[in-house]
Image (cartoon, rainbow, N blue to C red):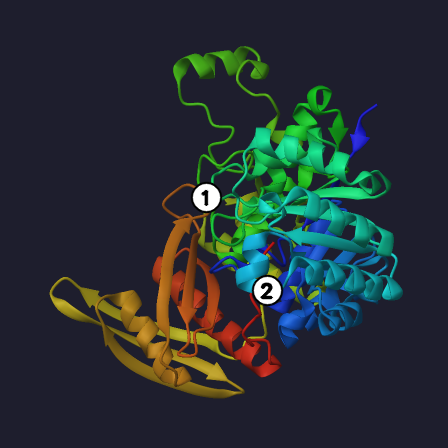
Amino acid sequence: MARSVRIFDTTLRDGEQSPGCSMNLKEKIKMAKQLERMRVDIIEAGFAISSQGDFISVKTIAETLKECTVASLARADENDIDRAWEAVKGAVDPRIHLFIATSSLHMEHKLRMKPDDVYERAVAMTAKAVKYCANVEFSAEDSTRSDMPFLARVLEGVIAAGATTINLPDTVGYTTPDEHYEFFMKIRELAPSLEKVTLSSHCHNDLGLAVANSLAAVRAGAGQVECTVNGIGERAGNAAMEEIVMALHTRKPFYGAETRIAANEIVRSSGLLTRITGVKVQPNKAIVGENAFAHEAGIHQHGVMQDRRTYEIMTPESIGLSKNNLVLGKHSGKHAFRDRVKTLGYELNDAEIEIAFGKFKALADKKKTVYDRDIEAIVAKEAVQVPRTYKLESFVINSGNTITSTAVIRMTRDGKTFEKVSRGEGPVDAAFKAIEKIVGRELALEDYRIESVTEGEDALGDARVRIKTAEGSEFSGRGLSTDVIEAGIHAYVNAVNKMLYAEREGLDSKKISATL
């Protein structure tokens, strides 16, 4: 019988630290609900003390979810632990996740502490966390570059103090699969108390080995794997959750382990994260890349037509991938639309349905055929939409290869109408500059991209932008339209609204950097 491995998802904490992947509160809640739908065991919702915004996010997620363990990261520090508990205490199963570095490099140059002091701090802070809740995880940062006897001493100490999960992070992605396997086996030998608790792996992808190292840890007895959707995270990212889950599922006889993840939610989770952050996965990405189940070579196509198993070791349906079916048209009613949205796996309230249905009807008037992916694009955008401080009313663009592009943008705010004209290097640049004039802010455009949601000349254009304020805060925006210029304008307005929402709610504080 296969043993169960817990999936600890840190998309909302470690993953969000990836440049360009920050999320607002509504986006985090939407992502957390999807992770719960996917049956993730533990969700690390954030680093509560890092900012007021992170505290609010962790607290709200903890009070919202009904089935998952919700954790907050905390340094081995009294204030961090107090703040973490305040954030997670409303969860059905709260967890405090504290950490301190154990490698000589980190202790000397980052912590500036002696090994004995690190040991005492780790044990004392674990004991403090245990007074708040029984579910306490301890992480030895940079454990794979630590002195093994000292690491074992620390682990024995924190287990005696009450830690129930011990995490051994490969913080800088330095180790290799064979080494990682031997590391886990050796530490189990040196610290026999590990047999009483859950042993966890947390791998970074600096050498492209995060998933392989995580699987090696599972072979060596790890009962928990820490990972992120699409492998997002600092530097080269974290171990990709979907790859770990499907490796254990597809090769269950080899690993002798399984997860409780609803694999048919993988594609939806990956797509939602992409739409929230605007960060796409590469086409050849394992499991969720658009080419993962594509076959172009003739011999492959022939084999798949005869028997899919010739070139597919898992089915597209097993991860929730379905064909792009025509589902609704311009004569479809709201009830049919609501049913289809629910079938696609989205839960929208009446107000969100009303907005999304209006977008759908407008699109149905412009397109010959409306596909599931079109509906998903509309719904996913509306589900995480922040309050519309500014709303686009109209735009006029004059552009050509013999004239300077100009844009006239009209927007409303609090019932008042604002209109500005601007010139630019092209129609998009002119439009963005006109929006900046209306908002009264100088913003740097960090990224702008557009792609089609489906095929055809009338395809819905999906635009994504990322802007940076003078203070250094970054905000992403997304816009949809069959007109690519309009899609870009909507995306820019969306990013501006996110900026204003964050500033109004006090959610733009600089975070304390933390990495495992």
Q: Which of 302 and 473 is in front in this view?
A: 473
What amino acid is labelled 1 in the image?
A: Thr
Q: Position of residue 29 (x, y in %)?
A: 68, 62
Q: In this view, does 8 lie to the left or right of 69?
A: left
Whether residue 97 is situated above or below residue 368 in the rendered picture: below
Residue at (69% x, 20% y) in the render:
254
What amino acid is labelled 2 in the image?
A: Leu
Whether residue 55 is situated above or below residue 168 in the rendered picture: below
Q: Position of residue 44 (x, y in %)?
A: 70, 56
Q: Is residue 357 left or right of residue 347?
A: left
Q: In which quarter of the image is the C terminus?
A: bottom right
Residue at (69% x, 48% y) in the render:
150
Q: Which of marks 1 and 2 is in front?
A: 2
State yes or no: discs 1 and 2 in contact (Cβ < 8 Å): no
Q: Where is residue 351 in the image (x, y as percent from the top left)?
A: 68, 68
Mark identifier at residue 377: none
Q: Where is residue 262 in the image (x, y as percent from the top left)?
A: 73, 39
Q: Name the residue under label 1.
A: 454
Q: How crowded is mark 2: few (under 14 residues within 10 Å), some or many (20 or more)?
A: some
**Res 361 visible:** no
Q: Mark 2 points at which residue?
A: 111
| Label 1 element class | loop
Who comes first in sequence, dot 1 or dot 2? 2
